[in-house]
Amino acid sequence: MRFRIINTIIILLLFAGLVLAFFGLASFMYVLAFIVFYILFLLTVSTNVRFNFFVKSFSENRKIKENEIAITFDDGPVENTLEVLKVLEKYNAKAGFFCIGKRIEKYPDIFKEIIKKGHFVGNHTYTHTRKMGALSVSRIVWEIEECNRIAEETAGIKMKLFRPPFGIVSPKTQKALQKTGLKSVGWSIRSFDAVVSSEEIILNRIKKRIKPGAVILLHDNNAKTVNILEQLLLFLKNNHYEVVRPDKLLEINAYS
C-alpha cells in the first residue's frame, strides 16, 4: 500500500510538472492542490478502519434502541490485563479483547483467564507490526493464521473476529480476510489512550461521544487504562447504560 501510494504520488508530481511547463502557474496550483487532497484522503481512509473504505468493518450498531454499549481492548494479553479483568468483574461488564499472537504465547494463562471470565477474544495479528500497510497479502494471511493457530492451541477456540493493528487497512487486508474467513471489527469511539497521557482528557473524550450502540477502543497494555475504565464504567452505570459483549452488540459470532 505504501509503495503504491508513493508511486502514484511520483506520477502525479511528474504530471504537475508537465502542467506547469505547458499551461502555466495557475493550472499547476490547481493540480498541486488536488495532489495534496488525494494524499490526505488516502492517508485518512487507510488508517481509519471505521470508514469501511477498503474493508467492511463492524464498528457500531446504529439500529439498537436499548442503552447498550461495548468496550474493546487491544494489544494484550499482558499482566495489566488481570487488573482490567478485576474492574470489569466488579461492574459485571463483559468486553472484547483483541490479542496479539506473540503475547498469547507469553501469557497463555492470562489469555485463558479472559475467556474464563466470559469475555471474547479476537485476532490482532501475530506480531502487531507497524508496517501493516506495506505487507503483502500472503504476509497478512500469515499474521492472521499464526495468531489464530496459537489461540486454538492455547484455549481450543477458533477466533473469527479480526482487528487490524493501528486501524490500518488496504485492499490487501480485504483479500487476506477473504482468504482466512475472518471479519473485521472496528470502533466508533477511539480513546487515544495509547498516545494521550492525561486520564481526564481521555475520559472526557469518550464521555462526549457516548451513545447507544457505540464501540469503545481502549488498550489493556496501558497501566492508566485501569483507572480510566473504572471511572468510565461508573459513568455508564450512573447514566443507565449496560455494557455488553461486542459480539452481542454487533450481532456477529466471535468464534467459528
Image: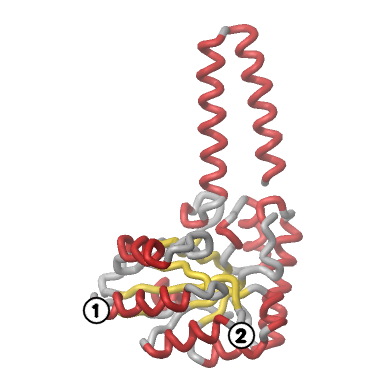
**Residue 42, relative to residue 13: is it above or below?**
below
Q: CA distance from mark 1 to mark 2?
A: 30 Å
Mark 1 vs 2: CB contact within 8 A:
no
Please state which amino acid type lies under the numbered disc 2: Phe
Q: Is residue 88 left or right of residue 9?
A: left
Q: Is residue 15 left or right of residue 73?
A: right
Label 1: element kind: helix
On residue 248, which mark appears? none
Q: Crowdedness of circle 2 by 10 Å Cα count: few (<14), some, many (20+)? A: many
Q: Viewer-proximal residue, 199 or 19?
A: 199
Please state which amino acid type lies under the numbered disc 1: Asn
Instruction: Point out residue 42 in the picture as x, y percentages from the top left corner.
Output: 56, 41
Look at mark 2 in the image and give the residue it sits on.
111
Q: Mark 1 against mark 2, which lies toward the viewer? A: 1
In primary-sequence order, the first of circles 1 and 2 is: 2
Instruction: Point out residue 156 in the picture as x, y percentages from the top left corner.
Output: 65, 89
Q: Viewer-proximal residue, 219 or 179?
A: 219
Residue 214: image quadrant is: bottom left
Instruction: Point out residue 98 in the picture as x, y percentages from the top left corner.
Output: 56, 73
**At 57% across and 7% down in the image, what residue appears?**
24
**Residue 163, relative to residue 29: is it above or below?**
below
Q: Is residue 116 left or right of residue 8?
A: left
Look at mark 1 in the image and give the residue it sits on.
238
**At 41% across and 64% down in the image, what residue appears?**
202
